[in-house]
Image (cartoon, helix red, strand yellow):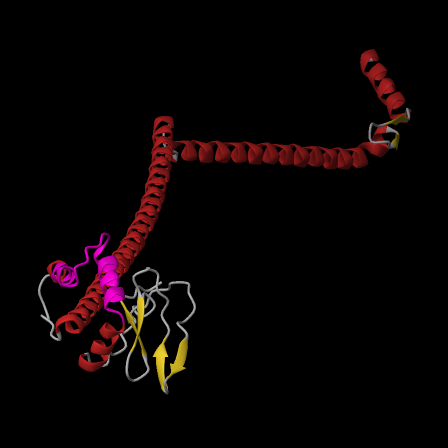
Amino acid sequence: MRSRRTLLKISLSLAETTFETSEGITGSPSTISAAALANLREATDKRAEEEKAKRRAKAAEAAAARKAAKEKNNKAKKAPPAFKLEEERRARAAAEVRAQEERAAQLAAEQEAARRAEREAAELAGAAEQAALREAAELAEALRRSEIDAEEEALARRVSRCEEAVSSESTGGGDLMRRVERLEASLGAATEGSLEERVGAIERLIGPEAGEAAEQHLPVTESLAAVSLADAGLDTGRPATPESTMGGETTCIVSASRESSRMLRSRAGTCALAGHALS
């Protein structure tokens, strides 16, 4: 019985004791039990929510990490191996080298074509120049031959006049040298020098008779056509040949470059150049 009474007293004393709970509620156990229980339940729920939120956050982080790892693995699986990447790199480098070589070859071909075109143009220009030079040389040779022929013709006419003055007749042909020798034999005079000088000596011996025979028997000599490089379309760098009016007719004044040229007066009063050379 004593023990029960003692416990009862202790319980009563505890009931009358005032204390403060961890939630900040002050009072006796009989007065704070309901409030403490509610607060305790609220705190417990709050801590549970916090723990649940932490777990959800950790789970989300873990899921994100797993997803990232999975994507990384997928990329790694899809990505080509290192040796394939190296092969692709080498293939690209080789293709670039080939492209550069092709461009260089094309440039070299274009340069060679340009040089070949220049050589062909130079060859054509050289050929044209050579052709022009040949034509000029041929024309000069033709003029020279024409000049020689004119000189020989003029000399033959002079010999014919001398023959007519000596024998009243002319052979009209044959070798000039023999004809001059016959004239010299007829006149009893032997001269030395060129054929033209010998004919000149014969003319001086005959005197005016040669001129008279020429006026009686020889036709009026027409003016020789002056053919020059300019007439052939070539630039000689010389001024045009002057003209002069003599005896009522316009004749061409041509300068003679040889001492053998002679101006013979015809009955019409015009001037003809015997054995002339174009200068």
Q: Is residue 227 above or below residue 43?
A: below
Q: Is residue 269 visible?
A: yes
Classify the position of the C terminus by image quarter.
bottom left
Q: Residue at 43% of width from left, 31% of height from top?
A: 73
Q: Residue at 28% of width from left, 77% of height from top?
A: 223
State the image coordinates of residue 10 (x, y, percent, origin top left). Answer: 86, 18
State the image coordinates of residue 270 (x, y, percent, origin top left). Answer: 32, 80
Along the viewing direction, whichever of 94 and 90 lies nearer the viewer: 94
Which residue is outermost to the top? 2
Q: Is residue 111 left or right of residue 208?
A: right
Along the viewing direction, whichever of 69 and 120 lies nearer the viewer: 120
Q: Is residue 4 above or below residue 223?
A: above
State the image coordinates of residue 106 (x, y, percent, origin top left). Answer: 33, 44
Along the viewing direction, whichever of 10 and 189 lies nearer the viewer: 189
Along the viewing direction, whichever of 226 and 98 lies nearer the viewer: 226
Most prominent secondary structure in the magenta stretch?
A: helix
Q: Quadrant of residue 155?
A: bottom left
Q: Quadrant of residue 152?
A: bottom left
State the image coordinates of residue 224 (x, y, percent, origin top left). Answer: 26, 74
Which residue is outermost to the front? 188
Residue 204 included in the magenta stretch of the image: yes
Q: Quadrant of residue 139?
A: bottom left
Q: Residue at 26% of width from left, 62% of height from top?
A: 200
Residue 230 included in the magenta stretch of the image: no
Q: Is residue 92 left or right of residue 164?
A: right
Q: Which residues are magenta?
A: 180-207
Q: Is residue 138 visible?
A: no
Q: Is residue 169 left or right of residue 24?
A: left
Q: Is residue 142 left or right of residue 244?
A: left
Classify the position of the N terminus by image quarter.
top right
Q: Residue at 18% of width from left, 73% of height from top?
A: 165
